[in-house]
Amino acid sequence: MSEINVVVCSEQTEYRVAVKNLLETDDFNVIGYCGIEADTKTKIQGYVPDVVVFGVESDDINDEFLSFIDDLDLSSSGAAAVILTDKVTVDIVNSAAQYGIRQVAALNTSAEEFSANLKKIVSNERKFSKKINVEKKQRSYVYAFFSGKGGVGKTTIATNLAVNLATKGKKTL
């Protein structure tokens, strides 16, 4: 399995550090951190993660929070949502499952167990994505051509590159 990209969403530094410590192996790459706020969806889509770990206190896990995660629509980009919390209860797990959360883990979970569970979640998510033909989104590239002088062929070069990339199946604009 290739390296697993993880984004950590939490307002508390304690949870950010905990996730970082739980994933200190070569199999995982924590590619970004964000809070739980209005522009979280945009940030997560920019990172293109395999897993998004939400670190929150168990008292803050309610229908409003779970609905916020559901609204992020992570499955459309092939990412899975996981919650890391201080206290796991049956009610929290049941509520989370209704909103498509793949796992609710305790803050005191061992690194080996947490890593193994994330690997299994990502593996299952990738299998599921292949079945329903969801392609993993990739970051886009911007190529810019410039010169201080006009008439040197910037437009010609840009057009030819776009045509070449399009013939290779890449999306161009």
Image (spheres, rainbow, N blue to C red):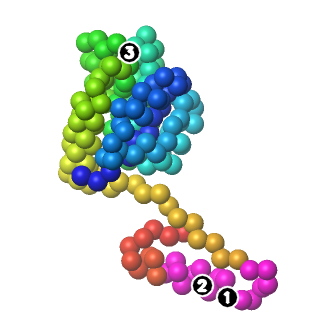
Name the residue at the bottom extreme. Answer: 152
Q: Residues within 10 Å of mark 1 (few under 14, many from 20)?
A: few
Residue under the point 63% across and 72% down: 144
Can residue 171 be seen by looking at this rendering? Answer: yes
Circles 3 and 2 in contact, beta carbons < 8 Å:
no
- Whole-percent x and y of residue 167? 41, 80
Q: Amino acid at mark 2?
A: Ile
> What are the residue bounds of the magenta stretch?
147-163
Q: Which residue type carries mark 1?
A: Gly
- 85 displayed left or right of 156: left
Foreground pick, 92 / 22: 22
Mark whose residue sits in front, 3 or 2: 3
| Residue 76 can be seen, yes or no | no
Give residue 10's position: percent from left, percent from top: 49, 27
Q: Are marks 2 and 1 in contact (CB under 8 Å)?
A: yes
Label 3 and label 2: CA atoms lie apart by: 56 Å
For disc 3, the marked residue is 86
Residue 157 - label: 2
As drawn, the label of residue 153 is 1
The amino acid sitting under disc 3 is Asp
